[in-house]
Amino acid sequence: MSDHNGIILSVNDLKTYFQTEDGVVKAVDGITFTLEKGETLGIVGESGSGKSVTNLSVMRLIPEPPGKIVNGDIIFNGIDVRALSIEEVRKIRGKRIAMIFQDPMTSLNPFLKISTQLMEVTRLHLGHSKQQARAHALKMLKMVGIPDAESRLNNYPHEFSGGMRQRVMIAMALSCDPELLIADEPTTALDVTIQAQILELIKDLKERMGTSVILITHDLGVVAGMTEKIIVMYAGKVFEQAPTKELFSTPANPYTKGLLKSVPDPAHEQGAELYQIPGLPPDVAHLPPGCPFAERCDRAQDICRVEYPPFVQINENHHSLCHFAREVYAESIREGGVK
Amino acid sequence: MIPFILRRLLIIIPMALLVVTLTWGLIRVAPGNFYTSEKRLPPAVEENIRKKYGLDKEWYEQYGLMMLNVVRFDFGDSLKYSGQSVNEIIKRHLPYSATIGLLAYLLALVLGLTAGIVAALKQNSAFDYGSMALAMLGLSVPNFVLGPILVLVFSLGLFLFPPARWGGISSLVLPVITLAAIYTAYIARLTRAGMLEVMRSDYIRTARAKGLDEKTVLLRHALRGGIIPVVSFTGPALAALLAGTVVVERVFSIPGLGNIFIQAVQNRDEPLILGIVAFLSILVMVFNLLVDISYGILDPRIRYE
Amino acid sequence: MAENVEIIKGTSLGRDAWNRLLKNKLAVFGMIVLGIMVIAVIIGPSILYAITGFTAEAIPADGNLISSFPPTWQHPMGTDEAGRDLLARVLQGGRISLMVGIISTIVSLIVGVSYGAIAGYLGGRIDNLMMRIVDIIYAIPYILIVIVLLSFFGGPNTPKWITAMSDLFGGAGNAGVSQIFLLFFALGLVSWLTMARVVRGQILSLKNQEFVMAAKATGVSTPSIIFRHLVPNALGPVIVYATLTVPSVMLTEAFLSFLGLGVQAPYASWGSLCADGIKNIAIFPWQLIFPGVTMALTLFSLNFLGDGLRDALDPQTRKF
């Protein structure tokens, strides 16, 4: 499945909590995963599931009041990220781990030209002079497919369309040829047609530059063609993790099944109602005992509401957090794959 | 940008004329006259006065003549200070007001911006609470209370500064501080709020994610957006500054334009009133234009056409 | 996320905001001090008169040349130049200052809200025109006009319709009272502009929402839509701005009274008391300090309250 070139990122039992007026919000409550070199990992979940917080934690971008990483190991290429000083973390940010965010309009500084924003990364991390940085920025813009890059270099973010802005963000992120790219909902704010282009771009660049990628999204359709491995998150916990193909064909978790069912299938009968998982994501500040998904789950039993589910290992690479993981898995096999 | 500036400049003159008309109208509609006093004047004397000042003509004639002159920037002579033209008087007294006004606003900017930025960076610290409490005080103590108290303490009590006199730097200190107080308060609060909002925004998170240190994040990325509220504030602030200088000139006996204006109003000195009103209106409008231009320079998303 | 905010409407929003306000210690402090001040100026003069027989106007005829006395037990704030008890004057002055502040703000509220709501709702060319007018008026250094207005139309020159109105409210032909009424209008006209802008902005963002279309569909008339549906929902920023307008108007009134153009004798406002007090500051500093500090304290409370309201009604601006 994936080349065993080594593990580039290992996150173990990560817990990031926030102190708010309403109490302690356990945004991320015990996440464990690994990412291998050259691999693309998808993290899927609804809003509030903790997916963004996980990745901000990896780069230690969590604002210290009110947030705090209370537990866990984050090992990047053998380096214990939590043990680093802030200056050392800054040397990694932008250079070895880069991040692109959801809304390129608000994620780019509206007051600065994109040349400034592109150049400052290489000037900082690679010691480029102004001319070198400028030439490099130009090269990056061309690489991400910005037409007329020469003159557009002097433009401001608002002078670009949404898709172009995201390309600029990607150019900025990949400027120093980072080992890991974290893409936090890179296409959510874009039109559907542009979405496909951006994903293609990420895929293409990843292959060219050998970058490992973490792709965060709420949209299962996005991860289908892009990732080798997927983690499904809910209420700050990993609900299921599996290789992509296996997750789609034989999910072992009711939540995952619900998500898969919600993806509209054009091949389905016309006029059929779209499926939606009933209810809303839970208030992470006031989680009920037992399984956080219990009140929305269509196969919840009494035990689900009372007892916290176990993390069941289905096979070597496939785990699911559910009292009935094996049953759900068996059912999926019987159904011959959901799609 | 240029067509925008030109359009704004062109509109200033008609606007000023409108203000002059309005003021003239108010003056003429009001009962009484500049020459009215407790004593009743003998009718012959009154007749002479009216003829001398052209008051015997029809109102529209008078208005027309006045406007004709005004357009040529000729406001005539003061009624009270005979022989002195309005323009002369304005020219003579303007430097006092301008000096304390500009110095006060500069002081307010320097102190306010610094305090606001530091307070935003060290949110919820002792400095934050302390400076914001001080700012509240600055907003709440009227300048005609602050001024005399400062005089009481520093001039009459500690003999550090002269209470009321013009000459030398030391006589400027107390008036400028008194005038600057409320603006320092506003600017500190606006800067703090603006910086806090900017620091919470996504592009600051991006800047940090790129590995930039906090100083660069602050100076290169946050500052431009954070001070925009202060720039917007400068427009109305300068208009309010006029009122402030009037008080300060009173309290510290400074022969500035504010004092002259009040006296002109009390003396019903029509030409002088109109002249000062026109002059100050133009000044305010020009300043507002400068503020809008700065706004356009600071924020590249704003494009005037 | 935006949907959640819309669901919380009506009473829930009010109660929610009220709770937040109460948690803000400074705002509560402001409310308490303000409450004390308001009660003091309403019943204070009567109590003082009952206890000591002093009023703001009474001048003891004791033939002394110098009547200004520093604070003593008999006169907790001392006396002014004419021998009048300063505490009584400060309380009286407070009545007038607060009243002028509140009523002028109400005037500017009425004018500003109506203007802004109409402009915002009607939109298009009418809105453009109305806002252009606001821009034009905004560019004028208003304070100069107000000074001219008060000076020329004050005192014996007060227009008949204002004296008529003041007589209606018990002024009984008193020049001092009609001057105060003149002030209501003059000051109200200073702050309505920004109020109009605020309201218009709110209306613009509200008017395309569903409940307006529902009202229109059921045939509700335009004025009704504006005033019964849109305005209540735009209330948040309006309340905040109104609370912040009161101290601003009070400062302007004090400024005018300080110049002798505002409240006239025998009435006093804190501004005019300060003006009197400055004359003898070197020898009788308390004559300025007491009214000055009282006024500053009141403005302080109003500002804290206004801040608290702003934080309570718009959580985005909260510290975190």
Image: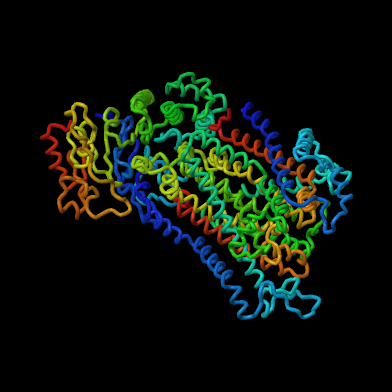
Is residue A75 at least partly visible in the picture? no
Q: Name the residue: 47% across, 41% down.
A: B201
Residue B27 appears at what percent x and percent y? 74, 47
Residue C224 appears at what percent x and percent y? 42, 46
Question: Which corner quadrant of the image does residue C299 belong to?
Answer: bottom right
Q: Quadrant of the N terminus of chain B?
A: top right
Q: How is the image coloured?
A: rainbow
Horizontal arrangement in the rendering, residue A138 relative to residue A68 (left or right): right
Q: Nearer the viewer, residue C87 or B110?
A: C87
Question: Which corner quadrant of the image does residue C139 belong to?
Answer: top right
Horizontal arrangement in the rendering, residue A307 relative to residue A210 (left or right): left
Q: Nearer the viewer, residue B75 or A315?
A: B75
Q: Name the residue: 65% across, 69% down.
A: C90
Q: Nearer the viewer, residue C242 or A67?
A: C242
The answer to whether B145 is drawn above or below residue A180 in the figure is below
Horizontal arrangement in the rendering, residue C33 relative to residue A229 (left or right): right
Horizontal arrangement in the rendering, residue C13 relative to residue C262 (left or right): left
The answer to whether C228 is drawn above or below residue B3 in the figure is below
Q: Residue furthest left?
A: A334
Q: Nearer the viewer, residue C78 or A135?
A: C78
Q: Quadrant of the C terminus of chain B?
A: top right
The answer to whether B7 is drawn above or below residue C208 in the figure is above
Q: Name the residue: 51% across, 38% down.
A: B212
Is residue C197 at least partly visible in the picture? yes
Residue B179 appears at what percent x and percent y? 70, 52
